[in-house]
Image (tube, grey):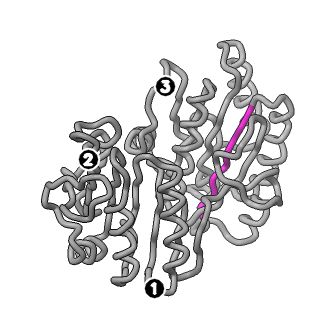
Amino acid sequence: MSDPITVDELRPGDHACLTYSDRDERLDIVAAFVADGLDRGDKIICYTEDLSAEQLAAELVSREVTGARDGQLVIAPSRDVGLTGVGAQPVVDVLGAELAVSVEQGYPGLRVSADMCWAVAPTPAVERLAEFETALGSLFTSGKLTAICEYDRDRFDPVTLAFAARSHAKTVAALAYHDDPVLRICRQHRPPGVRIAGELDFTHRDALEQALSEAVRLDRHLYLNLAKLHFVDVACATLIAKTAFSLPPGRTMTIVASPMAASVLRLLGVEDSGAALSGGSSSGGVVSGRGPVGDALSARPGGSFPGGDVRLRLIEADELP
């Protein structure tokens, strides 16, 4: 098993494994994988098990994955490819046929995202994973198929997860600035920004500063996901507020925060006042979100922000649909 890479480092022909414990992080990586495929002009198939096809489609839209041509993006239950059946070869045959059709249709390649939870419900099929993953490898020799197989750490045992990692040429993971049982700070791809979960205090200030600095450097419109942040002290909340208030003209930040994190930020002056922050100024307030993610996202890039003003949007996680 090679060292983990980020999803944007995947190349055509890669067969990658994603093991995850955070559902939102998994969906973020899948969204980035799909969006990159759309940018490349690939055909994309997402096989889903944990979510319905409609739910996964909504999750992709909420992460700004749009613009697929007719027939370019297919989202289907795992049973549609026979993943819940017996034997690996029929599945490989189906995927091989899909690859051939995508080439005939003029696509440069085929991307497949596979939720592997089919192997644990309702009829356990973990014993067939070795056969499935081994047989699937033959499809990648042309360099036109790229795939991510996704394994939930809470649903698969350690032995199966270890096998899954060994049977893939590459492992995909989010870029983590800090990761321990108490706190995880990592890069978020869709919308681009930073995700923080757990308990954040002054001892982690350096990691927080690194994550925020990189987001400021990479992202014109920052998205700070604090929905699973259970505790934040004043030192770290102040750093977040200062980062928002110091954005240059024309830049925006959306903060989705747990009620606890939102209350601390409001104590520091990050309030739902509806005022705009002029570029570089620390005077003023924060524009409140209307609630749904779609509303918040649609107002960010290219929105009606007057005269280069910086706009901040604070959304409490419990306001989301």
Q: What numbered label is drawn on residue 309?
A: 2
Give how far across and how far down residue 194 sits, in percent.
47, 60
Closer to the eye: label 1 or 2: 2
Closer to the eye: label 1 or 3: 1
Task: State which tag comes first along the sequence, 1 or 3.
Answer: 3
Task: State which tag comes first along the sequence, 2 or 3.
Answer: 3
Kind of residue at badge 2: Asp
Q: CA distance from mark 2 to mark 3?
A: 32 Å
Kind of residue at badge 1: Phe
Task: State which tag comes first along the sequence, 1 or 2.
Answer: 1
Q: Is residue 98 above or below residue 65?
A: above
Give SS at disc 3: loop
Q: What numbered label is drawn on residue 202?
A: 1
Foreground pick, 248 / 110 = 248
Q: Residue at x 71, y 53 (%)?
A: 17
Q: Residue at x 40, y 48 (%)?
A: 221
Closer to the eye: label 2 or 3: 2
Give SS at disc 2: loop
121 horizontally vs 291: left or right: right
Residue for badge 3 = 68
Q: Is residue 289 above or below residue 282?
A: above
Give SS at disc 1: helix
